[in-house]
Image (spheres, coloured by chain):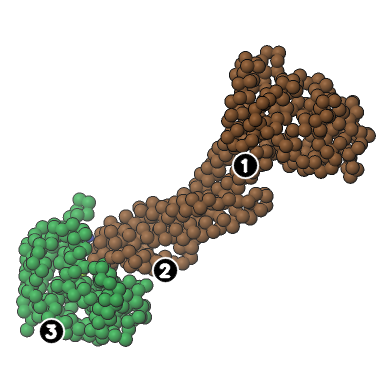
Chain colours: A green, B brown
Amino acid sequence: MIRVENLSKTYRLGTVSVEALRGVSFHIAPGEFVAVIGPSGSGKSTLLHLLGCLDVPTGGTYHLDGSEVSRLRPDDLARIRNRKVGFVFQSYNLLPRLTAVENVELPLLYRGVRPAARYARACECLERVGLGNRLHHLPSQLSGGEQQRVAIARALAGDPAVILADEPTGNLDSRSGGEIMDLFAELHAAGRTLLVVTHDMAVARRAQRLLRIQDGSLVGDERVA
Amino acid sequence: MDLLASVKVALGGILANKLRSFLTMLGVTIGVAAVIGLVAIGQGTQNRIRAQIESLGSYLLTVNIRGRGAQTALSYQEARDLTADLEEAVATAPVVSGSVTVKYGTREYDTSLVGTDHNLAEVRNMGVDRGRFLAPLDVAYWQNVAVLGQTVVSELFGFTNPVGEEVKINGHTFLVVGVLSPQGSSMMGSGDDQVIVPATTAQRLVGSRGVRTVYVKGRDPAAVDTLMAAIGERLTTRFRDADAFRIFSQTQMLETVTQVTGTMTMMLAAIAAISLLVGGIGIMNIMLVSVTERTREIGIRKALGARKRDILVQFLIESAVLSGLGGIAGIVVGLVLARAAGGVIGISAAIPVTTVLLAFLFSAGVGIFFGMYPANRAANLDPIQALRFE
Ligand SMILES: Nc1ncnc2c1ncn2[C@@H]1O[C@H](COP(=O)(O)OP(=O)(O)O)[C@@H](O)[C@H]1O
Ligand SMILES: [Mg+2]
């Protein structure tokens, strides 16, 4: 599903360059539930952005769902993000003026799905995350945990190859965070491929496999007991 | 993403900030209203002048004699003979002109003298309010009779009926036989401020050398060209100089006037268009602010798969809708203002459909043009930078 070889990313700020990722290689099979853990500033988000085709690596190769995607042009990257990737962010990143169902429809909107089909699919996904009774609420009318579940529904809407989550419980209290991780576990059980970035060991333990990152390098790859 | 969805997204953006959107539109509205209003008034003026020229008489030719050497005019008979046996000419009115002082009792008034014959009434569509116009015999027998314009009557007589009264014109006694109906003023000067006497008498009165203007009425539009050629030929033979005279047709005058007022209208519209430009800059300004404010939104949309084109179209539609709606409002306001202003200055504002259409397209174009830069900026945002934006 995901295969990266020697992936690296160097940010250049004028004369200074920051090596955020220094040659990372791993492989993720379909249906795996992987946690990426590491201290702040270790390069977790950078890795997730590369995997999500939000950014391009400065070195190495990246195969997603069978094709090499590390050297594509912006519009092709947009297409990959739209079809193959579902993002869940720490700060939810819902559009504040759109209702829950409209937010969930967005990936389908950019895919050109007809309105009726879009709406039906969005409702289905919101029901899947337990928000069937919150369809027409605005983000501001939802709790943090509910907002994050809308974001997960949005990630599911496009039926992507992989769901990438960057500190999805970072802004939540432990109970809501636990619920979100329960939801991820359910999705995993249903056969989804998931990659969750976190610096919280309690969260990471919910996964099946753990990738440890430090200073931009992969320092551990272990199965969770 | 289909167009309908893009429009919906763009409308959402506009409605999110109603007051700001309204103020932005106002800039375009004022610009378009100014263009429409000024063009309408310009066109109205043009139509009015045309109507005036047409009211001077149909198929009218004006012959101005400059002469050559010592011969600077025609005699009355020569002027009449200009159209002899030309059946295209319905009527010919030679005019001897000058300035005179008219006296009635103790009152005096300086006015223009027009020495002519009965044909002038037909050629220039003149009527009389009271009494009669000149008769053929008045000219033949050098009668001291006069027809007065309305201004002359009110200056000298007040409310007394002048017909049958005697006035002194440059010291000679004349019998007032008629009063002209109100003529209004035209490009030819005031038609009310004149006294009309027989051409023969006039020549003696002002010591003028003769007829320097001849009005000829053609039978139909086609006759005008034939007459111009025939009269031109006769005058060239008479003076042996093609520059000794000039012949204008009403059509030529119409063309000249149309050209002049058209240029004026264009200039007004151009000045008004500057305010439309300012409105456009207003749109650009607001769109730039909007793009900055919505950087995070753009980042989210891009993360979810929006292509550059989707973002570009979203913002372009937004600015085009802003300016298009502003334009429609401007058209309505412009029409209303033109009507009102036209009423005040006494013309009926004319609004060509093409101008309205053009104004609308132009304002929408302004939106797209000035929206291009902000929209491009939005479309080219780096998704990660945009997502980080607080
Ligand atoms: N756009 C950027 N420009 C420059 N440096 C960056 C940029 N993004 C991240 N970095 C640097 O790369 C390193 C890794 O950052 P990040 O991947 O966000 O870490 P994490 O998510 O693990 O906390 C950090 O040192 C950070 O300062
Ligand atoms: Mg991070």
- For mark 3, what is the residue? A189
- Chain that bears disc 2: B
Residue situated in front as seen by the camera: B268 or B335? B335
- Chain that bears disc 3: A
Q: CA distance from mark 1 to mark 3?
A: 86 Å
Residue situated in front as seen by the camera: B337 or B161? B161
- For mark 2, what is the residue? B16
Give above or below for B208 relative to B311: above
Q: Is residue A199 left or right of residue A218?
A: right
Which residue is rendered at x = 81% and y = 27% of the image?
Answer: B139
Disc 1 + disc 3, Cβ < 8 Å: no
Task: Tell me which image quadrant ligand 2 sits in.
Answer: bottom left
* Amino acid, disc 3: Ala
Classify 10 Å Cα crowding around label 3: few (below 14), some (14-19), many (20 and above).
Answer: few
Q: Which numbered disc covers residue B50?
A: 1
Disc count in the image? 3
